[in-house]
Image (tube, rainbow, N blue to C red):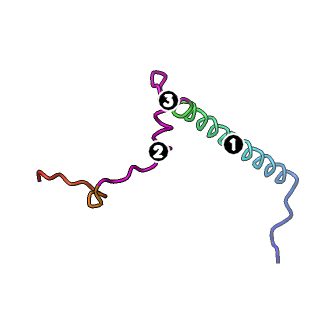
Amino acid sequence: MDTDPAPTSLQRKLAARANRRLGREIAAIVILKLLLLFGAWKLWFAHPIAHHMQVDTQGVESHLLAGAAPASDSSSQGVRHDPGR
């Protein structure tokens, strides 16, 4: 058995106003977060290469396309150790 009376029109209006206010607050927080993310991206990731740096594209191409150089000695593969120790 439901002992609560039916909500009055005033209660419905107050609930609708609270829902709208909550929706506006959530929208404002989402917009603020998007603005902060955009600002962080613009500050740290928009221009990752310094203007004074130059990249030798032919050197990079030859390095990436050359493949692995064959090892001269099969025992020298892996980690190199310092013989002086």
Question: In the visual, does 24 lie left or right of 48?
Answer: right
Q: Secondary structure at mark 1?
A: helix
Whether label 2 touches label 1, CB < 8 Å: no
The residue at the far top in this view is 52
Above or below residue 32? Residue 4 is below
Q: Which residue is mark 3?
A: 49
Query: What is the three-letter code of the residue carrying label 1?
Result: Glu
Residue 18 located left or right of residue 30? right
Q: Earlier in the sequence, mark 1 or mark 3?
A: 1
Checking the image for residue 79, the label placed there is: none
Q: Is residue 53 magenta?
A: yes
> Along the polypeptide, which appears first: circle 2 or circle 1?
1
Q: Is residue 57 left or right of residue 75?
A: right
Question: Where residue 27 sits in the image (x, y, percent)?
Answer: 71, 42
Q: Position of residue 39 (x, y in %)?
A: 58, 32
Q: Determine the secondary structure under disc 3.
A: loop
**Residue at position x 17%, y 51% from top?**
82
Q: Which mark is residue 25?
A: 1
Prevailing secondary structure class for the magenta stretch in the rendered image: loop
Q: Is residue 38 magenta?
A: no
Q: Which residue occupies the foreground of this view, 13 or 70?
A: 70
Instruction: Please give the range of residues in magenta.
Output: 47-72
Label 2 crowd (10 A; few <14 / some 14-19 / many >=20): few
Residue 20 higher or lower than 74, as above or below:
above
Q: Hey, what amino acid is under mark 3?
A: Ile
Instruction: State the CA–CA distance, disc 2 to disc 3.
Output: 25 Å
The spot of residue 40 in percent (x, y) is 55, 35
**62 or 49, which is in the foreground?**
62
Q: Residue 4's x, y, as percent?
A: 81, 68
Quadrant into which the N terminus falls: bottom right
Residue to which mark 2 is pinned: 66
Mark 2 vs mark 3: in front: 2
